Image (cartoon, grey):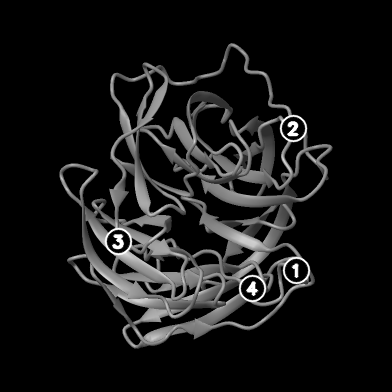
Amino acid sequence: MHLPLSALLLGASSSFPSALARTYQILAGSYSPDLILYTFDPAAGILTTGKNVTLIQSYSPSWLAQHPKDKNVILAVSEGDPGKVATARLEDKPEKLTVLSDEETGGPGTASAGFSRDGSKALASNYLGGSSRGYKVGRDGKLSPVGASIKFAGTGPNTERQEQPHPHDAHAHPRDPSIFYVPDLGADRVRQLKVSDSGTEQVGEFSTPAGSGPRHIVFHPKHDIAYVVTELSNEVLIFALESSGALSLLGQTSFLPEGAKGTWNGAEIAITSDGRHLYASNRNLSPGVDADPIAAFNVSSDGKSLRLIGQYGAGGNQPRAFKLFGEQEQYLIVGNTFEKAPSAVVLERDVRSGALKEAARLDGQAPTAFIWIE
């Protein structure tokens, strides 16, 4: 079922938070050699950049993650051959970084990496290499590989995009510090991996609909429910998380805009910390004059179903990644990566209804990952 592209009109009950007398700093990754430091001023409605930050000279830090305990420790990947993953510490000035470790990932095209829930382990996933590799994380934030990378097998019906495994995420189990989930776009599976001191092993795999191309996964903050955004079928898949760590498919919801033509690729997914709203972005590979949408959903009280609120313009085309931020997660920053008109856009979020509206923009850059520096 296709969904309407136009956003719902906001009534008098809308509750976009009033501008605070503070600014927000966002560190962004991209396919350029540097990290980008953004500053958003809500009162002025302005998004600016400061001095770019070089992580490691050979890196193109396309994905970032933040340590769950020590927010000053970040992780970045580089999609080269060989793929790399590094950790660094944010110093007193956000534009200054101290590199803590730099490790190979055991395969080319590292698309994602993340920390375990307690920050003691990490996992990197190699999109082009069809593999993942685990690491121990020291108290100083340094990575230590545990064994070799684990190579996956499998294909999907889309012969152009699913000719081999393409793991695209590395997301921690909400409680178990040894377990990660890896959506495999190429094989239509979500893989369950265990990282221990002796190595990385696959302990489970869970099928997604044929040709769906699972990309990223998030978990409900209060219930044992997982949500997977699919790149190829433009859906959000809803799974029950069993006590064993297994995932059982409960349902699926399309977020393809009504009347959409051509090829669209789902990209990012996020759920608010109160579990009430979920967002997913979609990319038109042949964009026109209209901005591509971010779909907003109401999440049911048990987390098992989604209801579309509306489709809201991302302020540009091909929104690859976005990040909720602010004390009430009242803002969302998105990177629009269409090469002819790249942009970073801040959207203000109505914390009651979940609706979005543009608050600030900066054209000319194509960020692909974000960290809020609190």
Amino acid at dot 1: Glu
Query: Circle 1 sits on which residue?
Result: 160
Residue drawn at (36%, 17%), measured in percent from left and top? 43
Give whichever of discs 2 and 3 has the lower sequence position: 2
Badge 1 marks a residue whose secondary structure is loop
Give whichever of discs 1 and 3 has the lower sequence position: 3
Residue 148 at x, y percent in the picture: 41, 87
Q: Are marks 4 and 2 in contact (CB under 8 Å)?
A: no
Q: Are marks 1 and 2 in contact (CB under 8 Å)?
A: no
Residue drawn at (81%, 47%), measured in percent from left and top? 262
Task: Answer few, some or many: residues within 10 Å of disc 1's Cα (few below 14, many 20 plus, some between 14 and 19).
Answer: few
Give whichever of discs 4 and 3 has the lower sequence position: 3
How many numbered markers are drawn? 4
Q: CA distance from mark 2 to mark 3?
A: 41 Å
Residue 335 at x, y percent in the picture: 51, 41
Residue 1 at x, y percent in the picture: 83, 45
Give whichever of discs 1 and 4 has the lower sequence position: 1
Which disc number belongs to residue 5? 2
Amino acid at dot 4: Phe
Q: Nearer the viewer, mark 4 or mark 2?
A: 2
